[in-house]
Each structure stands twice: as structure tokens, then as C-alpha cells.
Amino acid sequence: MNILLTIIAAVFVFSILIFIHELGHFITAKASGIQVNEFALGMGPKLLSFGSGETVYSLRLFPIGGFCAMEGEDEESRNPRAFGNAAIWKRATVLVAGSAMNLLLGLLVLTWFSSQLNLIGTTQVARFAENAVTNQVLQPGDIITRIGGKRVRTSNDLQYRLMRDRDGIVEMEVERGGRLIPLTVTFTMVEADEDIFLPVLDFMVVGVEKTPARVIANAFDWTSMYIKQVWGSLVDLLTGRFSLAQLSGPVGVTSVIGEAASSGYAAGYQQGGFWEGFRQSLQSILHLMSFITVNLGVFNLLPFPALDGGRLLFLAIEAVRRKPVPVKYESFVTAAGFVLLIGLIVVVTFNDIVKLVSSFWGG
């Protein structure tokens, strides 16, 4: 049951994310007058296909990718409607649109989750949990304004700043009785995975009435927190705070999706049977999908060859030089970047498999 649920959930998530991404390219290409030869979901042999105008729409065997094949995208073409012959701003719009759609999907899902909240969280301390340690310095009514010198405006800011902490001790600034007071606050630390530690909040914050404006603002703030997490993780990787072994690839992500689906279903099934299990499983999957799609949207805009961000970099060079980079050079750099990217995927996939095997034998 768990394996089947994992497969179904992973195919659902990856298919949605890829479809949305490629749909962004497709819509903006069509709107820009660029000829689209094929719009495909999946890779490998065609299962179904039909033509409409100049475009073939296809569903392919392996649900591990998809593409929007535009005329003259990877080679020179004399077709006036080829991608390479379009204005720079049009090509840039098409490239950005894929990631923009992933970010929009994340925002929409998080807007829905925000709408399900009873209250919208603030940064004001409401009460403490049993056996709390933060109540040694914090007091009910304290409004947390800064953590580590960084401004904290929302509960999502609060969560993000604490997640960036490593030793469970943070410098805070709180507003208490109309005065700003500096504090050193110790948090309980939990070992999440190897040497990764997460602070655990042992206090609750005050919630305010849910309104449409606050729901939307919270969704934007939630999305922003995810974006900052991506950039923060990248900085951590480059500075050596996290190692390559701690990255997750497709296998690791699939495993996490499966765990979310299974735990959601199990909890719901105990409460109300199959349909409640299905509802909570879907909710868990959507929550995780919002995080993954934001990650995908940000990662794909990095200025690395083989990513849309890398192609945007070539467009920027073209705009400065006032002439395009020769196709053969761009193709070579893109191919080299693709090889490096595949190599990275292989490494993190190997790490994922090792972790799964270790977990299996350890369990």
C-alpha cells in the first residue's frame, strides 16, 4: 500500500509541477508569436498525441519530464517565428514564464492553506507550552521585532529566522511595555537528520482575525519564506555549512512525498475512514508540493547552463553585445552544464539510495 501510494503521489506531484512549468513556456510562446512544434507531458515514446494547427500535443510513456518544443530553440532557423529570431524581451519572457508559473502555483496553494487557518499568526508571544525554556526570558505579550539583528514582521519571518539558527541560542529584540529590550533566548534543539538541528518553538503566538487581505498577505509571506529558504540553502552549500551528502534528489523527494502521503492517509483513516484518509493525504501532498514548486521555480532561474537561468544569462550577454552568442558556443556550454547537472543528480540520487537502504536495515 505504501509503495503504491508513494508512486501515485510522486507521479501526481511531478506531473503537476512539470505541466505547470511547461505551460508557462507554452502560453507565453504562443502569445509572443513563437512557433511551438510540440507540447508534451512525459518523456519517451508517445502514448497519445493529436495535432491542432502547427502544434502537436502529446502524452508520453515516462512521467518524469515534459517539454515545450519551440522552432529554432536549440538551432538556427530561418523561420521568422523561430524562438531565436524573436526579440530578446520576448525570449526572456518565455524563459521566465516557466518558473513564474511554479511560483504562482505555490502561492495559490499556500493561499488556500492560509484560508483554512482559524487565525493569522503574529510575532507576539501568547503563552508557553509545558516544560518551556523560553519563558526564562520571554514573557506573554512580548512582541518579537528582531532575531539576530534581522527584522521580524510576521510569524513566517519568526519561523524562518529560527530555522536558520544552528546552536539554539539567538539574540532577540522584543517590544515590552512600549520599550525595545534586547534578549538572549535559548531554544530546545531537536536532531532532525545527522548534524542538522532545528529549534522547536515552545511558545504560541497571538493570532489575529482572518480577513481576505490577511490571508493573501500571509500566503505571499509564506511563499517568500520558502524562497528565502532556497537561497539560504544554496549559500549554506557554497559556504560548507551543509554538505553535498545532505542534498536530496528525485529518489529522496519521492520518498518524502510518499511519507507525507502515507502519514496523512493513516491519520485520516483512523479519524474517519477511507475518504478522510484520502483528504488528509491529499492535503499533506499539496502542502509539500507548494514547497517543492517554489524550490523548482527559484532553482530553475539560477544562472547555470542547462537551466532557464543560464539561457537568460546568454540573453543578457546578447543584449550587451547587441548580437547573439554563436549557437555552437552556447550549445557547448549548455551541454557541459547539462553533463554537470546530470552528474550532480547521480551523486545525490546515490546518497538518497544509501539513506533509504540504511533506514531500511536500521529499521
Image (cartoon, grey):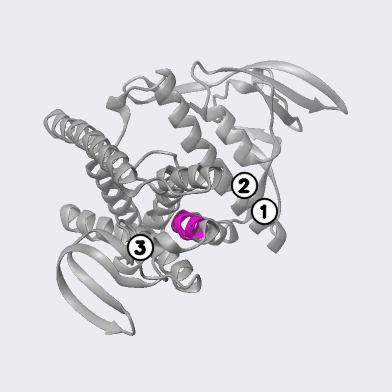
> Label 1, label 3: how many angstroms apart (C-alpha)?
25 Å
Q: Which of pointers 3 and 2 lies earlier in the amino acid sequence?
A: 3
> What residue did someone put label 1 on?
217
Residue 176 image-quadrant placement: top right
Tell me which amino acid carries mark 2.
Asp
Nearest the camera: 91 or 139? 91
- Where are the magenta residues, as a range? 91-102
In this view, 338 is above or below 10: above
- Residue under the point 50% across and 73% down: 31
Q: Horizontal and vertical percent for residue 98?
A: 44, 58
User: Badge 3: how crowded within 10 Å, few (<14), some, or many (20+)?
Assistant: some
> Label 3, label 2: how many angstroms apart (C-alpha)?
23 Å
Q: Main secondary structure of the magenta part?
A: helix
User: Badge 1: how crowded within 10 Å, few (<14), some, or many (20+)?
Assistant: some
Question: Pointers 1 and 2 in contact (CB under 8 A)?
Answer: yes
Left/right of residue 355 with respect to residue 149 in the rendered view: left
> Label 1, label 2: how many angstroms apart (C-alpha)?
6 Å
Labels 1, 3: front one: 3
Q: Horizontal and vertical percent for residue 248?
A: 29, 36
Quadrant into which the C terminus falls: top left
Left/right of residue 178 with respect to residue 277 in the rendered view: right
User: Badge 2: how crowded within 10 Å, few (<14), some, or many (20+)?
Assistant: some
> What residue did someone put label 3 on?
16
Q: Which of pointers 1 and 3 lies earlier in the amino acid sequence?
A: 3
Element at label 3: helix
Left/right of residue 211 with respect to residue 241 in the rendered view: right
Q: Horizontal and vertical percent for residue 195?
A: 35, 19
- Residue under the point 55% across and 48% down: 223
> What residue did someone put label 2 on?
221
Tell me which amino acid carries mark 1.
Ala
